[in-house]
Image (cartoon, rainbow, N blue to C red):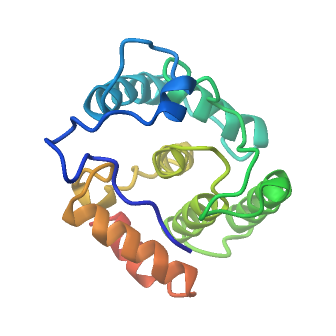
């Protein structure tokens, strides 16, 4: 699977990359014209969603919860917040199978947790990998997958993952290691991801 590159504006002044016209058409705030502005606006939206999500222990292993978290993360940013993608991209399952793939993942995760198939960290890492692999939404899948995974851990009384303690939304060493770990998990080796999520 090909994981997306950073949208940090490489090749231009940091963050000054103009938004693609197709992206701009889907934005709710009309004043945003650059990636730098978009990144800041999205982060504020996501911070509010995290506060809402962690205010109490929420059950996140349902389709409605998966959509609700994404909607809350991007409801002040994108028209399609909380809506599954309706086309194929270079990453993710064939779009008509998104719901079916998520149902299978959520059922597997429920089983792993109920039967102690894996330790909690490994179950959460496996869950995260498959959620990102499915790539259910037009954008924000990595950020969404990390937030949902952290909510799953916290609902079980376990601390959230540290995710390499770096910024995973722009070009950085932590992002490079994260993407490398996801690719290894695609190939069946979960070790790098398990090491990364608590690093």
Residue 85, image quadrant:
top right
| Residue 76: image location, x then y, percent | 50, 17
Count the labels in the image: 0
> Does 96 sit left or right of 33 as displayed?
right
**48 relative to 95, above or below:** above
- Tell me the residue at 65%/62% (across/down): 92
> Does 23 sit left or right of 118 as displayed?
left
Residue closest to the eye, 167 or 40: 40
Residue closest to the eye, 2 or 151: 2
**97 relative to 147, above or below:** below
| Residue 3: image location, x then y, percent | 48, 66
> Does 44 sit left or right of 148 as displayed?
left
**69 relative to 136, above or below:** above
The reply to whether residue 53 is in sight is: no
Residue 172, image quadrant:
bottom left
- Tell me the residue at 74%/61% (across/down): 105
Quarter of the image with the N terminus in it: bottom right
The reply to whether residue 93 is in sight is: yes
| Residue 185: image location, x then y, percent | 52, 79
| Residue furthest out toward the left | 13
- Tell me the residue at 39%/50% (across/down): 159
| Residue 45: image location, x then y, percent | 42, 23
Quarter of the image with the C terminus in it: bottom left
């Amino acid at each position: 699977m090909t994981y997306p590159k950073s949208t940090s504006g490489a090749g231009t002044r940091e963050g000054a990359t103009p938004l693609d016209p197709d992206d701009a058409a889907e934005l709710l705030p009309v004043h945003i014209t650059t990636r730098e502005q978009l990144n800041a606006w999205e982060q504020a939206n996501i911070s509010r969603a995290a506060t809402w999500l962690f205010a109490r222990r929420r059950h996140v292993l349902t389709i409605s919860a998966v959509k609700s978290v994404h909607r809350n993360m991007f409801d002040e940013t994108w028209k399609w917040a909380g809506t599954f993608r309706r086309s194929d991209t270079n990453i993710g399952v064939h779009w008509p199978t998104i719901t079916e793939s998520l149902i299978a993942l959520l059922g597997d995760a429920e089983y792993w947790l109920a039967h102690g198939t894996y330790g909690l960290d490994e179950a959460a890492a496996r869950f995260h990998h498959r959620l990102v692999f499915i790539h259910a939404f037009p954008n924000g899948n990595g950020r969404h997958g990390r937030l949902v995974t952290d909510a799953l851990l916290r609902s079980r009384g376990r601390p959230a993952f540290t995710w390499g303690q770096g910024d995973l939304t722009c070009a950085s060493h932590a992002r490079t290691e994260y993407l490398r770990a996801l690719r290894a998990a695609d190939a069946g080796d979960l070790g790098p991801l398990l090491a990364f999520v608590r690093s």
